[in-house]
Amino acid sequence: MFDFAAKQSAGLCYDAFLARHGTADQRTRWGAIYERVQLSSPQQALLAGFQRRMIVYCLAGAWCGDCVQQCPIFAQYAAVSPNIVLLFFDRDAHPDLAAELRVCGGARVPVVAFLSEDAQLVGWYGDRTLAKYRQLARDQLGPSCPTGLVAPEQELLAAVTQEWLDEFERAQLLLRLSPRLRQLHGD
């Protein structure tokens, strides 16, 4: 069984991850998406209401177009919720974590692992949301990888933001309803 707790100290916050692994151009692209993410008042209230500390590992690559378009969303969530501890791991620098979080047999990114406050795996999700896969199915005639050079349309960004928020909420509710954690916290 993978030791997520042992990996925690190697995680980087959003800015440190980009500083270490991103080029100036990549940091600019990530920043542009970060600025475009618009959390509605209900979304902000939901995030601010998270009561359980939730450690979130994001396996990513600064070079990855899907990461450019999705990882800034997670940083926005963490900025709103003091109970989200968001840690980034470069896929190529952490092959052990990449192997543990394979999607369809491949080392895909971004992949998010949701952990309890004591680093127990709650669940994981990645590499794209349903809205993104639907858009790709409409647009692509063959395999390709988005570059992140062209920002997604605002409607798609909003849909992806909501679908990822649904996953964060699911993990938070699992933590809130966990008999083990309810006993620990007396709630």
Image (cartoon, helix red, strand yellow):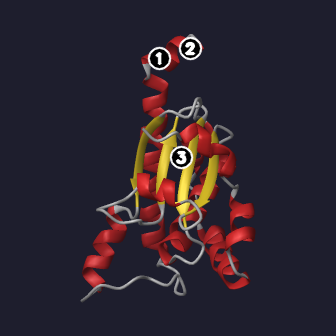
- Residues under numbered marks 2 and 3 in contact, where contact means CB atoms less than 8 Å apart: no
Question: Label 3 crowding class (10 Å Cα cut-off): few <14, some 14-19, many 20+?
Answer: few
Label 2: how many Cα within 10 Å (few below 14, some 14–19, many 20+): few
Q: Looking at the image, which residue is at 49% across and 26% down? A: 176
**Disc 3 target residue:** 42
Screen quadrant of the C terminus: top right
User: What amino acid does circle 1 point to?
Assistant: Arg
Task: Give the label on residue 180, or none.
Answer: 1
Tag 1 and tag 2, C-beta contact below 8 Å: yes
Residue sitting nearer the eye, 127 or 137: 127
In which quadrant of the rendered view does residue 174 lie? Answer: top left
Q: In what element is the residue under mark 3?
A: helix
Q: Position of residue 155 (x, y in %)?
A: 44, 71
**Do tag 3 and tag 1 residues touch (Cβ < 8 Å)?**
no
Q: Quadrant of residue 48?
A: top right
Q: Which mark is residue 48?
A: none
Instruction: Give the residue at x 58% y 29%.
Output: 118
Helix, strand or loop at mark 1: helix
Eyeballing the image, is 65 above or below 51?
below
Give residue 184's mark: 2
Q: Quadrant of residue 102?
A: bottom left
Amino acid at pointer 2: Leu
- Image coords of residue 67 (percent x, y): 52, 69
Residue located 50% across and 78% down the image? 65
Residue 12 horizontal side relative to residue 60, left or right: right
Q: Is residue 176 above or below residue 29?
A: above
CA gap, disc 2 to disc 3?
29 Å
